[in-house]
Image: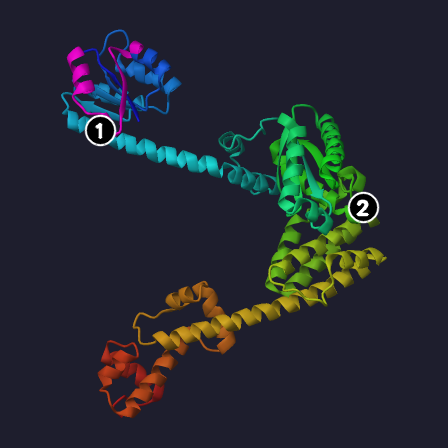
Amino acid sequence: MKILIVDDDVIIRKGLSEGIDWPRHGFELIGAAGDGEEALELMKLQTPDIVISDIRMPFMDGLELAERMNESYPWVKLVLLTGYQEYEYAKKAIEMRASEYLIKPIHNMALLQKVIELGAQIEQERTYSRQVQEGMPLLRQRYLQKLVTGAAGSDFHSEIKFLALPLDKTVFHVMVIKIDGLHHPELLKRYSEKEIIKYCVHNIARELLGDRGLTFDCEDDEIAAIVTGDADPKGLFESAYAFAEELLDQVKRYVKTTITVGMGGAYEGHEMLPKSYQEARSSLSYRHYTGTSQIITVHDTGLFADMNELQLAGLKKELYAKVKLGLTEDSLAIVNLLERKLFEAQLEWSQIHLLAVEIAVVIFQGMQEWEEEDAGRKDFYTVCKELQELETVSDIFRYLRAFVEAVTRDAMKVRDSQTKGLVLKAMEYIDQHYSNENLYLQEVAGAVHVNPTYLSIIFKREKDINFSDYLLEVRMKKAIQLIRKGELKSYEVAQQVGYPNPQYFSVVFKKYTGYSPTE
């Protein structure tokens, strides 16, 4: 930790320099200056961590030095000293963001203590800064995922500045790059791990994009790219398409695999990123019809206008949540609403097929939250193939309804099994701790790792009795057993079943059994 002392008084300067054993306390004195100008010259040669400066000095005083340091060395801590106990000096020192403001004369040990405290603060800030820098890739990744899905919030410019993201342009375009056959045994045999393949594609994409945009992880076998520029949207789209063509060629040449690129539209304003991203995802879904190893634009699919007007993202998100929870009726209601919207929109047949595939994707995503391997379950490819063979909208949605009913029924079985297990664990905990007078729903819920309200609901549903009534029943039955043995007095029985107040126990016991403990 480096120290610089600034004072026009030679005696004070020497006293601060030599009167404190700086090295012993972990500090290195890099110089002593007679005024602010000299201090700035020394700082050009070697930047200190802490500057201790008098306020009243000729040529350049401590307040002006503080102002100059704020401009050029904002991270350096400043301790200002003055022999004048005037409010204006203190006020000005605070405005200059001085770390400390001390009144002279000050004892060397008191100054040393302040400097030690500032040193600890600097170490803490450096630790935090290192942690932020180490976590920056993850922070960027999460923010970009939120940005393209519309969940990033409104402070766009502050976020991209903090994360150092090159998104300060006016026009934006999003594409989604899918690595074909990422899980294929032959490809994995060549690279040993799928992450290596993805890393290679990332590197090629980043090199080709340069300062025109950025890439980030999307799904398991997908990468998203944001292309930016100050040109008109049409010009940016053409530039992005050229980038995609070159990327296809280089991945095939150097990685020895293929990619499929889905391209959304190019728009002015970062607010349009989610729209472009959704168009890119929809375009990519179309590969089930057109094949892989190619570029599919939103214009190619015919989705550019009509499908976006449907605004189905919210419904698909809701369907995912309902399937995940195994709620059959709610899931079917959403599928029915989707069908009505399609009839009203009068989309082309290819668009209807694509939306059916997207709905199937949502259902499969919901299944993945709970489903175990099932040899009898249709895989995604089979479902898409069967959907493609259907010839009417009614047939497609009849198929989807049957599919939803099957998967939500299975989901409910899984949830019922999990629920029964939770309730049994809760009952076991009650049986073991009923003597604890402070045994409440919150404690039991914490023991089985669920929300108290949720435990209360599933307890009532599974056992047809409220949690509090069950706890009372356990305590009363145990009390009856102890009383029948005749070995304990009434107040001793009360304590053993969780009632420290014998009178209250007697009231509760009589209300439950119709008899007092004595009777």
Q: Quadrant of residue 57?
A: top left
Q: Is residue 122 magenta?
A: no
The residue type indicated by label 2 comes to Gly
Taking the spot 58% from the left edge, 27% from the top edge, the residue there is 168
**Percent of width and height locating residue 109:** 16, 28
Q: Quadrant of residue 227?
A: top right
35 with respect to 393 (left or right): left
The residue type indicated by label 1 comes to Arg
**Percent of width and height locating residue 306:** 76, 43
Label 2 neighbour load within 10 Å: few <14, some 14-19, many 20+? few
Q: Which residue is mark 1?
A: 24
**CA separation in Å, label 1 and label 2:** 72 Å
In the depicted structure, whether residue 385 falls above or below residue 282: below
**Residues in magenta, as a range:** 10-38
Q: Quadrant of residue 309?
A: top right
**Percent of width and height locating residue 147:** 58, 39
Instruction: Answer yes or no: is residue 438 visible.
Output: yes
Please state, as top left, top right, bottom left or bottom right, where the C terminus lies in the image.
Answer: bottom left
Q: Which residue is mark 2?
A: 291
